[in-house]
Amino acid sequence: MSVVFILVGLALLVVGGEFLVRAAVALSFKLNVSRMVIGLTVVSFATSAPELLVSLQAAISGFSDISLGNVIGSNIANLGLVLGITAIISSIDVDRDFYRFNWPVMMLFSLALYYFLYYGNDLSRFEGVLLLLGLVVYLFLLIRKSRKHTKVDMEGIDDSLQQTSNFKMIIWLVIGGVALWGGSELLVDGAVDLATLMGVSERVISVTMIAIGTSVPELAASVIAALKQEKALSLGNLIGSNIFNIASVLGITAIIQPIVIQSNEILSNDIFWMIGIAFILIPLVFLPRRYEISRYKGVILFVSYVIFTGLAFLG
């Protein structure tokens, strides 16, 4: 039953996340928020809702390792699994903003998370506030930079949502909220039960199965786009997702319920994988063919993720 709980929980999170994104975008149009701001803030926050609900539910239930493992594992999966597989199917072009702005900010948040967890063995409310304030600064700079571009491609925005009625928007919000709440409950319960049955820690299940599950929608969309020979994936979107995972998901969770480390492996192993796989993007981008994540580079990322997952279970 634990596997069923996990699968149903993930399905509910996907459905709830989709309805919440649509409702959030529709509401933003009603409030006359600019399309650029919707893409850079509203969509990003809404798509982080599944991870937020899972982390919050786990922290409140006393399973802090699931809160941390969910975010750390998702960040590793975004770069190792999603970016790796997509690059194997079709090479990805990298713009200069990657190493001038997006990558340094992601590394800064990753190192800040390690610092907060290392000194104190937890993520306190104050540190959660600092992460959120850092996110506000990042978004301010991101919006200011975007205003300088004549054309900004915003994914996840359907212009037809401008015509959404208030009744339909409320229904979407209700469905999204209930599905996210129910999905997070089932996912956390299922993960704890499965970890007990398999004789592994909740941390192992969270950094592998839960992390992969929450990355499946993004992976599916990226693979379909790559197979169609469309622009497969915006590397900036993945980097932004990792920043939001740390700053908003863990930041908000820590403010509501401080996160205490229960497994030493999170500090001695998992977070180093997260920082390491993010760091190697720089040499990969500049090696032989510059500004491109080619197929063999995708293989390196994917193999790294497979090794990480294997070691998590073996450990």
Image (cartoon, rainbow, N blue to C red):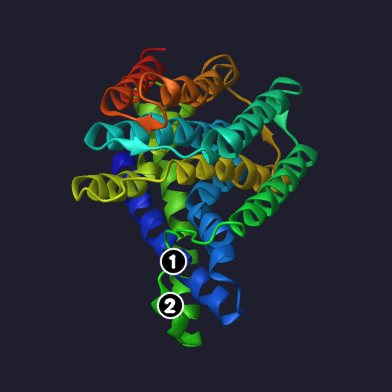
Which residue lies under the disc numbered 2?
161
Q: Residue at x 58, y 41 (%)?
A: 243
Residue 26 place in picture, x, y as percent: 49, 76
Q: Is residue 44 left or right of residue 136?
A: left
Q: Quadrant of residue 197?
A: top left
Q: Is residue 254 left or right of residue 49?
A: right
Q: In front: 160, or 204?
A: 160
Q: Is residue 125 left or right of residue 26?
A: right
Q: In front: 235, or 57?
A: 235
As drawn, 182 above or below 64: below
Which mark is on residue 3?
Answer: none
- Report whether residue 164 is seen: no
Residue 111 place in picture, x, y as percent: 65, 26
The three-letter amino acid code for the residue at tag 2 is Leu
State which quarter of the image contains the C terminus. top left
Which residue lies under the disc numbered 1?
157
- Residue at the far left: name it: 227
Dots 1 and 2: beta carbons under 8 Å? yes
State which quarter of the image contains the N terminus. top left
- Report whether residue 252 is seen: yes
Q: Residue at x 50, y 26 (%)?
A: 278
The CA distance from mark 1 to mark 2 is 8 Å
Q: Residue at x 43, y 26 (%)?
A: 285
The three-letter amino acid code for the residue at tag 1 is Ile
Residue 300 place in picture, x, y as percent: 33, 20
